[in-house]
Image (cartoon, rainbow, N blue to C red):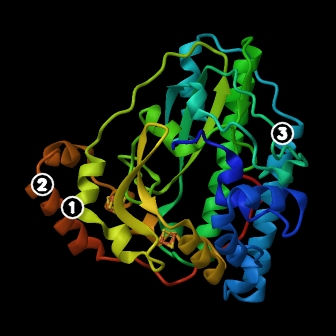
Amino acid sequence: MDLPYDERQTLFSRVRLKAGSNRYRAFYARWPQLQKADDAVRGMDILAASGESKPRQQALKDHIDGVDARVRALYAHPPALRPLQRLDAIREVALSAGAVDAGVALLSTRDYYQRFGGVGENLGRDTYGEETPRHYSRALVFAVEMRLAYMLRAPRAEVLYESKRAYEAVARIGATVASRLQASGYEAAFASEDYYLTPMVPLARKAGLGEIGMTNHLVHPDCGNRIRLGAVYTTAPLIPDEPREYGIRTFCRRCALCLMNCPSRAIKPYTRRRQGTAFFQFDEHACFRMFKALGTDCSICIVSCPYTHGIDRRMQRWMADDRERMDAVLKKHLHTHGRRPRVKTPLPLECEGGW
Ligand code: SF4
Ligand code: SF4
């Protein structure tokens, strides 16, 4: 049975449940098949496991704490910006604020989480189990690019650093867009790492930003897997975009580099459907165990993807639906970048105090 989205069912919510608490007991009374595997990945000191030197661990911790504090401040004291002159300029607002792409999704009840999973403790809110507000009719969905130089260090601390930096950018762009919409007379709320009303990947697909690749990430035609997603949920009557096909899923069937490089074998080539959207099967516990063992985001799948390194749009059109041409593009990628692109020299983890 295809149950509605519920944030409590996400692994990031489940691993936050305190063993033996009422919430823990209530959840696993309903989903006993998840308990053992969830318990095995619960609780971790990611920085200590990272194998980084103490100063680098401290730099990363300062960065994470700094981003969390600044995002908290954005929710507590959102910017007060001027109204829009034209509603259709809102996409440009997101791009000017730093998004690499943006689109509009028309929201239906099936896009929403029905209940919060309590991932927003950074905001000082305990909303676990509460119904999500679902009166917004649109979402302006956008992507923020993660820098290739940092992602090429996967699976080292640089990727966690860069991911966190991108999440801060997501929150700042979201706060800017939401403020402009509110000043124009509409309701608007921005998503962030600490506040989601919907899963982001199917929403971004719906807004035409890319396709869901074998990684189960949104694969953007220019940035590949190397993005973080943001959204502003709103009552503004924005003109919706449609899902678009870029040939990415067909290419995935020829490529499977993420699957072959995944150290935990979490990625599977078989499709599954959820709320009408096609995903790939995925062993979330295997991936999370790797996260725990490495002490940082693994992200090997992200950096394995040919789209992450850039496939020219003309090349994409040239190879569309032609398997021989796709194989030629793949061969060229392997020749240029190898099967598993990686740089081992470290990059600085110095936070300058803001995005
Ligand atoms: S993050 Fe690492 S372990 Fe998880 S799916 Fe990607 S490659 Fe596999
Ligand atoms: S690495 Fe290949 S199979 Fe995996 S998402 Fe990218 S294109 Fe698809």
Q: The residue tagged with tag 2: helix, strand or loop? A: helix
- Label 3, label 1: how far apart the Cα atoms are: 43 Å
Which quadrant of the structure image shows residue 342? Answer: bottom left
Pointer 3 with pointer 2, Cβ within 8 A: no
Q: Residue 20 placed where, x, y %?
A: 87, 68
Q: Earlier in the sequence, mark 3 or mark 2?
A: 3
Above or below 280: residue 36: below
Q: Residue 225 placed where, x, y %?
A: 44, 56
Residue at the spot x=40%, y=42% of the render? 210
Q: Earlier in the sequence, mark 3 or mark 1?
A: 3
To which residue does mark 2 refer?
323
Q: Earlier in the sequence, mark 1 or mark 2?
A: 1
- Residue 113 in sight: yes
Relative placement, left or right, of 283 versus 66 is: left
Pointer 1 with pointer 2, Cβ within 8 A: yes
- Name the mark on residue 254: 1
- Name the mark on residue 75: 3
What amino acid type is highlighted by mark number 2?
Answer: Arg
Q: Residue 1 placed where, x, y %?
A: 51, 44
